Amino acid sequence: MECIFCNIKDRKSEAEIIFEDEHVLAFLDIQPVNYGHTLVIPKKHFDNFLTVPKDELDKLIHATQFIAGVVKRSLNADGFNVISNNGNPAGQSVYHFHFHIIPRFDKDFTLKPVVRNYSQGALQEYGEQIRSFISKYKDIYNG
Protein backbone atom coordinates (compact mmCIF):
# COMPACT_ATOMS: atom_id res chain seq x y z
CA MET A 1 0.00 0.00 0.00
CA GLU A 2 1.27 3.45 -0.91
CA CYS A 3 2.30 5.77 1.95
CA ILE A 4 1.72 9.50 1.54
CA PHE A 5 4.50 10.31 4.02
CA CYS A 6 6.99 8.14 2.12
CA ASN A 7 5.89 9.95 -1.04
CA ILE A 8 6.52 13.30 0.65
CA LYS A 9 9.95 12.11 1.78
CA ASP A 10 10.74 10.96 -1.78
CA ARG A 11 9.38 14.26 -3.20
CA LYS A 12 6.64 12.42 -5.12
CA SER A 13 4.00 14.42 -3.20
CA GLU A 14 4.13 18.07 -2.25
CA ALA A 15 4.54 19.33 1.29
CA GLU A 16 5.71 22.47 3.04
CA ILE A 17 8.92 21.01 4.48
CA ILE A 18 10.34 22.97 7.39
CA PHE A 19 13.18 20.68 8.54
CA GLU A 20 15.17 17.78 7.21
CA ASP A 21 18.25 15.85 8.20
CA GLU A 22 19.57 12.37 7.44
CA HIS A 23 16.93 10.61 9.59
CA VAL A 24 13.98 12.97 10.04
CA LEU A 25 11.62 15.09 7.96
CA ALA A 26 9.20 17.73 9.30
CA PHE A 27 6.46 19.46 7.35
CA LEU A 28 3.29 21.44 7.96
CA ASP A 29 0.04 19.51 8.35
CA ILE A 30 -2.38 20.40 5.53
CA GLN A 31 -5.32 20.09 7.93
CA PRO A 32 -3.92 21.91 10.95
CA VAL A 33 -5.47 22.10 14.38
CA ASN A 34 -3.73 25.52 14.59
CA TYR A 35 -1.60 27.23 11.96
CA GLY A 36 1.97 25.96 12.27
CA HIS A 37 0.79 22.41 13.15
CA THR A 38 3.81 20.33 12.17
CA LEU A 39 4.32 16.63 11.51
CA VAL A 40 7.69 15.03 12.30
CA ILE A 41 8.41 11.67 10.67
CA PRO A 42 11.30 9.22 10.53
CA LYS A 43 12.57 8.88 6.98
CA LYS A 44 12.39 5.11 7.33
CA HIS A 45 8.87 3.73 7.30
CA PHE A 46 7.51 2.35 10.58
CA ASP A 47 3.78 1.79 11.06
CA ASN A 48 3.47 3.03 14.63
CA PHE A 49 5.29 3.95 17.84
CA LEU A 50 5.79 0.30 18.86
CA THR A 51 7.62 -0.60 15.64
CA VAL A 52 10.23 2.19 15.72
CA PRO A 53 13.67 0.89 16.80
CA LYS A 54 15.19 2.64 19.82
CA ASP A 55 18.02 4.32 17.89
CA GLU A 56 15.55 5.73 15.32
CA LEU A 57 13.18 6.86 18.08
CA ASP A 58 16.03 8.63 19.90
CA LYS A 59 16.80 10.65 16.75
CA LEU A 60 13.14 11.38 16.14
CA ILE A 61 12.47 12.57 19.69
CA HIS A 62 15.58 14.76 19.66
CA ALA A 63 14.44 16.39 16.39
CA THR A 64 10.86 16.76 17.67
CA GLN A 65 12.10 18.55 20.79
CA PHE A 66 14.17 20.96 18.67
CA ILE A 67 11.38 21.61 16.15
CA ALA A 68 8.76 22.11 18.89
CA GLY A 69 10.93 24.83 20.42
CA VAL A 70 11.40 26.51 17.06
CA VAL A 71 7.68 26.34 16.22
CA LYS A 72 6.75 27.77 19.63
CA ARG A 73 9.23 30.65 19.42
CA SER A 74 8.66 31.49 15.75
CA LEU A 75 4.87 31.74 16.19
CA ASN A 76 4.97 33.32 19.66
CA ALA A 77 2.85 30.43 20.89
CA ASP A 78 2.04 30.19 24.58
CA GLY A 79 2.54 26.42 24.57
CA PHE A 80 2.31 23.35 22.35
CA ASN A 81 1.09 19.77 22.26
CA VAL A 82 3.24 16.86 21.09
CA ILE A 83 0.88 14.06 20.13
CA SER A 84 1.19 10.63 18.54
CA ASN A 85 -1.92 8.74 17.45
CA ASN A 86 -1.36 4.97 17.27
CA GLY A 87 -4.04 2.74 15.78
CA ASN A 88 -7.40 3.61 14.29
CA PRO A 89 -9.24 3.98 17.66
CA ALA A 90 -6.57 6.53 18.69
CA GLY A 91 -7.11 8.59 15.54
CA GLN A 92 -4.19 7.38 13.43
CA SER A 93 -5.05 7.94 9.77
CA VAL A 94 -1.60 7.65 8.16
CA TYR A 95 0.24 4.46 9.09
CA HIS A 96 3.73 5.95 8.98
CA PHE A 97 4.72 6.82 12.54
CA HIS A 98 4.81 10.55 13.26
CA PHE A 99 4.57 13.16 15.96
CA HIS A 100 2.22 16.12 15.75
CA ILE A 101 3.50 19.44 17.12
CA ILE A 102 0.50 21.71 17.65
CA PRO A 103 1.20 25.31 18.67
CA ARG A 104 -1.22 26.50 21.37
CA PHE A 105 -2.32 29.96 22.41
CA ASP A 106 -3.92 31.19 25.61
CA LYS A 107 -7.13 32.17 23.84
CA ASP A 108 -7.52 29.26 21.42
CA PHE A 109 -9.91 26.32 21.81
CA THR A 110 -9.40 23.56 24.34
CA LEU A 111 -8.16 20.05 23.62
CA LYS A 112 -9.05 18.60 26.99
CA PRO A 113 -9.98 14.91 26.93
CA VAL A 114 -12.87 13.45 28.83
CA VAL A 115 -11.51 12.57 32.26
CA ARG A 116 -12.68 9.40 33.98
CA ASN A 117 -12.60 8.50 37.64
CA TYR A 118 -11.52 5.06 38.83
CA SER A 119 -14.08 3.14 40.86
CA GLN A 120 -13.16 1.86 44.32
CA GLY A 121 -10.17 -0.50 43.97
CA ALA A 122 -9.93 -0.14 40.19
CA LEU A 123 -6.81 2.05 40.32
CA GLN A 124 -4.92 -0.70 42.12
CA GLU A 125 -6.33 -3.40 39.80
CA TYR A 126 -5.16 -1.58 36.68
CA GLY A 127 -1.79 -0.92 38.31
CA GLU A 128 -1.34 -4.60 39.14
CA GLN A 129 -2.39 -5.70 35.65
CA ILE A 130 0.08 -3.34 33.95
CA ARG A 131 2.92 -4.12 36.41
CA SER A 132 2.51 -7.87 35.74
CA PHE A 133 3.17 -7.21 32.03
CA ILE A 134 6.12 -4.94 32.85
CA SER A 135 7.66 -7.82 34.82
CA LYS A 136 6.93 -10.23 31.96
CA TYR A 137 8.51 -8.01 29.27
CA LYS A 138 11.20 -6.19 31.28
CA ASP A 139 14.00 -7.84 29.27
CA ILE A 140 12.77 -5.94 26.17
CA TYR A 141 13.24 -2.65 28.06
CA ASN A 142 16.71 -3.59 29.22
CA GLY A 143 17.65 -4.99 25.83
Image: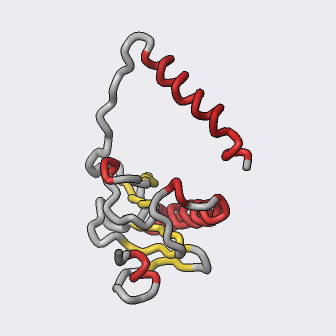
**Residue in the picture at 50% in, 56% down:** 49
Q: Is residue 5 above or below residue 64?
A: below
The residue positioned farthest toward the bottom in the image shown: 12
Q: Is residue 45 above or below residue 50?
A: below
Answer left or right for 121 relative to 69. Answer: left
Answer left or right for 81 relative to 42. Answer: left
> Which image quadrant for residue 136?
top right
Q: Is residue 116 visible?
A: yes
**Residue in the picture at 26% in, 49% down:** 109
Q: How many numbered badges does the structure rendering display?
A: 0
Foreground residue among 74 and 120:
120
**Residue 3 % position (x, y):** 37, 75
The residue positioned farthest toward the right in the image shown: 142
**Residue 66 % position (x, y):** 58, 65
Foreground residue among 28 and 60:
60
Can you say which quadrant of the picture contains the N terminus?
Answer: bottom left
**Residue 73 % position (x, y):** 49, 64
The residue positioned farthest toward the top in the image shown: 120
Answer left or right for 117 relative to 124. Answer: left
**Residue 139 % position (x, y):** 71, 42
Q: Is residue 80 visible?
A: no
Foreground residue among 111 and 104:
111
Q: Is residue 27 above or below residue 100?
A: below
**Residue in the picture at 39% in, 59% down:** 103
